Image (cartoon, rainbow, N blue to C red):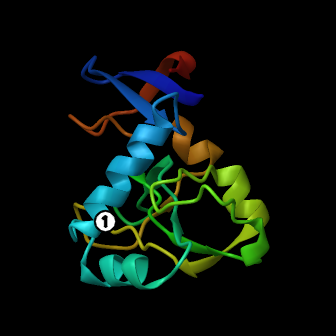
Amino acid sequence: MGEMINFVCGKCGEEYSVFYGNGFRFYKEYEDTVLALEKGEYGSEWKELFLNNKYVAIDAESYVYFCKKCGNWQEERGLSLYIPRNKEIISKEYNKYSAIMNSELRRNYRILKRRIHKCSKCGKIMHKANFEEFQNLKCPKCGGKPSIAEFGYWD
């Protein structure tokens, strides 16, 4: 189940929401992410790594990435690529569209290639927002300070 936070900007009154994690549609979203990867939508390097590594898995979960330089934030899929630590764990029903949950990635896979997320405003490298950053994500309209209006789950 994914989580969400609804914010209200204290400066301009803009209401905005942040969604992260994964929901009931994760299996479909995973498949869509694989299809986009195969088409090269995440770059030729990602496409080649995915196509040329047997049992590769992708982090298709959504996260909030934060830029320390300019304070911008973006919701994006993780997109790092993983391979199994031990090929014995692969089920006989495996295919490249078999969604691998993050708990399984952490437990049974190792990183093949980490996805670097870059800020769309200043181009600097972003990181997953920590708790404090997450609670203070600037208003995307005016940059004002938000207050949390609601916290909940989606899907």
Amino acid of disc 1: Leu
Instruction: Name the residue: 26% across, 38% down.
Output: 140
Crowd around label 1: few <14 · some 14–19 · many ≥20 (10 Å): many
Instruction: Name the residue: 28% across, 17% down.
Output: 13
Quadrant in the picture for residue 68: bottom left
73 displayed left or right of 112: left
> Relative to 57, does residue 65 appear above or below in the rendering?
above
Instruction: Name the residue: 40% across, 32% down.
Output: 145
Residue 72 appearing in the image: no
> Relative to 125, does residue 133 appear above or below in the rendering?
above
Residue 133 appearing in the image: yes
Q: Nearer the viewer, residue 133 or 23?
A: 23
> Relative to 99, does residue 4 appear above or below in the rendering?
above
Q: Quadrant of the N terminus?
A: top right
* Spot occupied by residue 66 in the image (x, y as percentages of width and height): 44, 56
Q: Residue furthest front?
A: 92
Q: Which residue is mark 1?
A: 37
